[in-house]
Amino acid sequence: MSCMRRFCHETQSHDSLHSCMCRRSVALLLLKMSEERDPAALSGSAQTEGEEDLFVSAMESPEAARLSAEDISPSSNGPRDDDPDDPDDLFAEATEEVSLDSPERQPILSDGPSPAITPVTISPRVDVFDRSPDLDEDEEENRDTFDIQISVSDPEKVGDGMNAYMVYKVMTKTSLSIFSRDEVCVKRRFSDFLGLHSKLASKYMHMGYIVPPAPEKSIVGMTKVKVGKEDLSSVEFVEKRRSALERYLLRTVKHPALLKDPDVLQFLESSELPRAVSTQALSGAGILRMVNKAADAVNKMTIKMNESDAWFEEKQQQFENLDVQLRKLHASVESLVCHRKELSVNTASFAKSAAMLGNSEDHTALSRALSQLAEVEEKIDQLHQDQSYADFYLISELLGDYVRLITAVKGVFDQRMKAWAKWQDAQVMLQRKREAEAKLQYASKPDKLQQATDEIREEIEEWEGKVQQGERDFEQISKNIRREVGRFEKDRVKDFRVVIIKYLESLVHTQQQLIKYWEAFLPEAKAIA
Amino acid sequence: KIYEPEVHSDRRKWRMRSVSVDLNNDASLVIDIPDALCERDKVKFTVHTKTTLSSFQKPEFSVPRQHEDFIWLHDTIVETEEYAGFIIPPAPPKPDFEGPREKMHKLGEGESSMTKEEYAKMKQELEAEYLAVFKKTVQVHEVFLQRLSSHPMFRKDRNFQIFLEYDQDLSVRRKNAKEMFGGFFKNMVKSADEVLISGVKEVDEFFEQEKNFLLDYSIKIKDATAKAEKMTRSHKNVADDYNHISGALNNTAADNNTAFKNMCVLQKVEDRMASDQELKLTELLRYYTRDIQAAKDLLYRRARALADYENSNKALDKARLKGKDVAQAEENQKQCLQKFDKLSESGKKELTSFKARRVVAFRKNLIEMTELEIKHAKNSVSLLQGSIEILKSN
C-alpha cells in the first residue's frame, strides 16, 4: 500500500496529472485491497493450508486427478438463448412500454422477484489440461513453505535526453533461508530485468524448464519518457511497465528451481549489478540471438520427430489451440477497454449537455432535476473510467502475459525436439562408426590395421557415450516438461481464477456505485411537479 | 405491453405482437398498434381502433398502414388552415433498420469463418437490435396517432378518420394529395422561420417569453439528443464486447464454465441497461426535439399572421390616402386581425398545455429510467456475486 502513496507523491509535482493518477491510484488501491484480502494473491504469499492440501491430495491420487464427479454431467450447456417464453428469462418483465406523452397511461412497471441464480452444472468438456500426477516430492514441500513478497515501485527517471532511463525499486520480503536478509531493497533498470531473463533462458530452457518471459521492449513508449513528455500516455506507459516487471519477478520466483538460482538471488539482493549490455537489440549478443532464432526456425521445419509419447502430441496441440483462443480473447478485451473509454467520454459530454438543457428549462423543478441528472452522469463517467482501468490492468495485461507465456511453453517443446534430434544424430554417427569399423577388416594394410582399429574403437566408445547421454537428456527433458506443464496448468488456473474474481469484484463495486447514484437521483425525479 | 418477436427465417420477416391493452383515458376513441410486420424495407403497422363515436362505421376495426401513410396524414393536417393555431404532433421518423441490416449482412458474409457459437451469438445480437428498433418505431407511430385522437379538434378530422377506417390501400389518395399540395409547406426554407420569429415586435409578454425560451431550448435539446445518442451507442458497444468476451472465455477455461456462463447473462443485463436508457432518455429527448420544432412552427405561423396583419394595416392606410378600394382593405385588415387573434388565443392554450405535457413526460420517463437502471444494476450485482461465490468455492 505504501508504494501507492509514494507513487502519488511522485506526481505531485505534475499538478495536472495528479488528480488523474489519484483516481487511478484509488482504482489500483481497490485492487490491491482485494488482493490483500485474498490470500491466494499474485504476490505469492503462503497458500491457505486447506486449499493446498485439497489440491495436493487430488493430484496424488490417480483416479482423482480429474474434475470432481459433479462436474461430469451428460447435459450440455450452451449459451442461453433469448427465448421469451423461458421462465428463466430475466427480462420478461422489463419490456413494458409506456408512451412518451399521454399522461393518462399508467406506467406498467413490474416489481418481479429478483432472479435466482440457476445453478448450472459444468459441461463435460474434456478437461484437456491433464494435471500430471507425477510431481517431485520436494517440490511439494517447497510449495507449502512458499513465502516471498516482491514489489516493484517508485519509478524514477535518471539522466536526460536519449540516454535517460527509468530506475525501479525492487523490494523483497521473505522468510526463506536462501536469502541473506528478510527484507531487501535494490534499484534496477529495465535492461537488468532483460539481462536476468536472458541468463535464465540460456541456463534452463534447454532442460525443458518454462522460463517466464520478460516484459516487452517498447521503443515508442520509452522514447516518449526519455524525451520528457510528461503527458498521460507516458505516465500510463511507466505504470504499465512497472506492473509488468512486478508480475515478471513474481512468476520467476514462483518457479522452485529459478528461485534458488544464484542469478536470481543476485538480482534481488545485491546492490550493484553489472550492466547487461548484451540485451540491447543491436549489440553483438543481440545479433547472435537473432541469428540463433532464425536457425532454430529452420531446424524446426526440418526435424521430423517420431513421437512415441502421445501425451506430448496432445499437449502441443492443446497449447496451439489455447494460443489462438487467448489471442482472440485478448483482442476482445482490448476492444472492451477502448469502448469503455469512449463511453466515459460520451457520458461526460452528455452530462455537460444535460446541464445546459437544465439551465435552459424554464420549469423550475424540471430544471433542477435535469441539473441533477447531469451530475449523476458525470459521476457515472468517472465510474466508467475507473472500470476501464480495471479492465485493462486486470484482464488485458494478464492475457498478454499468458500469450507470451504460451510462447515460452511452445519453446520448451521445441527444445525437446532439438534434444531428440541430437540423440538421433548421435545414433546415426555411432552407426557410421560401427560400419566404418566393419569395413576396416577388409580395407587397410595389416600394419596400419591395429592403429586404425584402436582409433575407431575409441570413437565408437565416444559416440556410444554420446548416444547414452542423448537418450538420458531426452528422457530428462521429457520428464521435466511433464512436470513443468503440470505446474503451469495449475498456476494458470489459479492465476485466472484470482484475477477473474478480482475483476468481478471490481464490476460489483461499479454496479453498487451505480445503484447508489441512481437511488439518490430518484427522489429528485419524483419531485418534479 | 409485451412484445413477442416471431421470426420467419425464410423471408426474414419479423412480426411483433403486443399483448396487453393500453389504458386510455378517453374510451370514446382508443387507438393502438398491436402488430407490426417487417418485410425487407417495408414496415406494415396494424392500426387498431375502438370507438363509441357515431362518425365511424364500426365500433372496432383494424387496418394495415405503411409509414408513408402516417406522413400523408401529418402533412394534410399541417396544410389545413384551420389548424394553424395548434401544435401539430410531429410526424414519426422513418423506421431505420440500417444498423440491424448491416449486422445481418456481416453475419451472412462471415458465416463460413465463424464458429457455431460465434454465429449464434451474433445472431442473438442481431435479433436484439431488430427488436429494439422495432419497439422504438412502433412506439413513435402509436404516440403520433394517440396525440391526434386525444386532441379535441384533430380527432374530428376527416382525413384522420379515413386513415383509421379506410380498408383499402391509401397510396392512391397519397399521390393525389401530393399533387394538390405539392409539399408546399415543407419546401419552404426553414431558416426563414428563425429570423421571422425573432424579428417580430412582440407586445404580448407571454409570447415574448415563449419565443425566447423555445429558441434557446430547441438548440439545447437537439444537442442533448445527439450526445445521448452517442452515449447510448457506446454503451451498446460495451455490451457487445461482453458478448464476445464471454464467448471466448467459454472456449478457453474448461473448468470455470459456470462463472463464465454468468458473463453471458451479464452481457444481456448490460445490453438491457443500454436499451432502456435509450428508450427512456434518448427517445424522450428525440421526441421533444421534434415537438419543440412543432411548437416553433406554431410561433412561426402566428408571426406570419402578425406580419400579414401589419401589412394589411399599411395597405389600409395607403388605400385611405389614395381613396381607392378602402372597403376591401378594411375587410382584409379585419380578417387578418381575426386570424391573428384566433392564432394567439389557441396558441396560448396550446403552448401552456405543451409545457405541462412536457414536464409530465420528462418526469415519468426519468423516473422509469432510474428505476430500471437500479433494477438492472441490482440484477448485475447478484449475478456477479453468484459467479464470485462459485469461483471462490471451486
Image: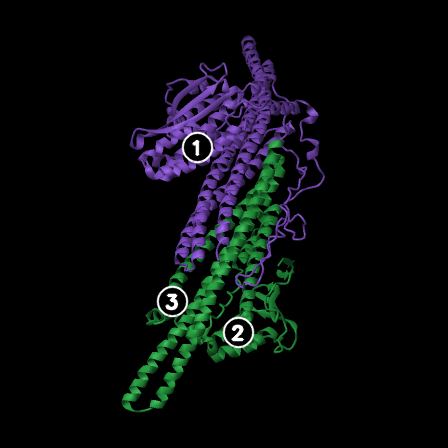
- Looking at the picture, how far across and down is residue B25, in whole percent? 59, 66
- Residue picked out by circle 2: B154
**Cα–Cα span, label 2 and label 1:** 71 Å
Give the label on residue B211, or none.
Answer: 3
In the picture as drawn, the residue positioned furthest to the left comes out as B321
Question: In terms of secondary structure, where does tag 1 sit?
Answer: loop
CA gap between label 2 and label 3 equals 25 Å
- Choose between B386 and A401: the one closer to the eye: B386
Chain ID, mark 3: B
Residue type at the position of mark 2:
Phe
Taking the spot 44% from the left edge, 43% from the top edge, the residue there is A382
Tell me the amino acid under the disc marked 3: Lys
Determine which quarter of the picture holds residue A498.
top right
- Which secondary structure, mark 2? helix
Residue linked to disc 1:
A216
- The answer to whether mark 3 and mark 1 are in CB contact below 8 A is no
Q: Mark 2 or mark 3: name the one nearer the start of the chain.
A: 2
Residue A35 in the image, given as x and y percentages of width and height: 51, 30
The amino acid beneath tag 1 is Glu
Which chain did the image draw in green? Answer: B
Task: Chain A: give its colour.
Answer: purple
The residue under the point 66% across, 25% down is A58
